[in-house]
Amino acid sequence: MNITRYLHTAILVSDLAPAEQFYGGVLGLSKINRRLNYPGAWYELGEIQVHLIEDKDFVPQLQNPAKWGRNPHLALAVENLEAAKAHLTAQGCELQLSASGRAALFTQDPDGNVIELTELS
């Protein structure tokens, strides 16, 4: 077997509308067309996609609620972490700075899925 490319990450959400507002509106990811017969939304970031899949029964559980980065999460790079922090704060998002000392922070989508934003140097 020779894996050649990373394609997407699928994220379960309980309600598609607030999830789309978060991923498209707050994070600014670009929504793309999808041709599937179940509720969801696809977003594209470069060659990678984020697939939101609606499951009305989904209940997220943080394994480590004290340190969000020690839970399953989606990591995205930002140009300016301070600008991202200000933007998320203005949008009413809860934030947690990385405990590692890296230029990174964590937030959560409306369902509690963890998103890491990291400034790469």
Image (cartoon, rainbow, N blue to C red):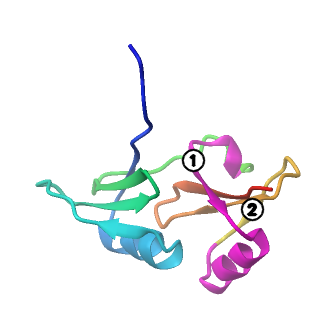
- Residue 32, x across and y down, in percent: 29, 65
Q: Which mark is residue 73?
A: 1
> Tag 1's secondary structure?
strand
User: Does the magenta-highlighted stretch encompass residue 80?
Assistant: yes
Quarter placement of the C terminus: bottom right
User: Which residue does the numbered mark 2 point to in the structure image?
Assistant: 96
Above or below 67: residue 107:
below
Residue at point 46%, 57% (across, down): 46
* Amino acid type for the residue under numbered disc 2: Gln
Looking at the image, residue 114 sits to the left or right of residue 103; the answer is left
- Residue 44, x across and y down, in percent: 40, 60
Say which quarter of the image contains residue 2.
top left
- Residue 36, x across and y down, in percent: 14, 54
* Magenta residues, start to end: 68-93
Q: Mark 1 to mark 2: distance in Å?
A: 13 Å
The answer to whether the residue labelled 1 contacts the one labelled 2, judged by CB atoms less than 8 Å apart, is: no
- Residue 67, x across and y down, in percent: 74, 49
- In this view of the protein, which residue sits in the foreground, 21 or 94? 21
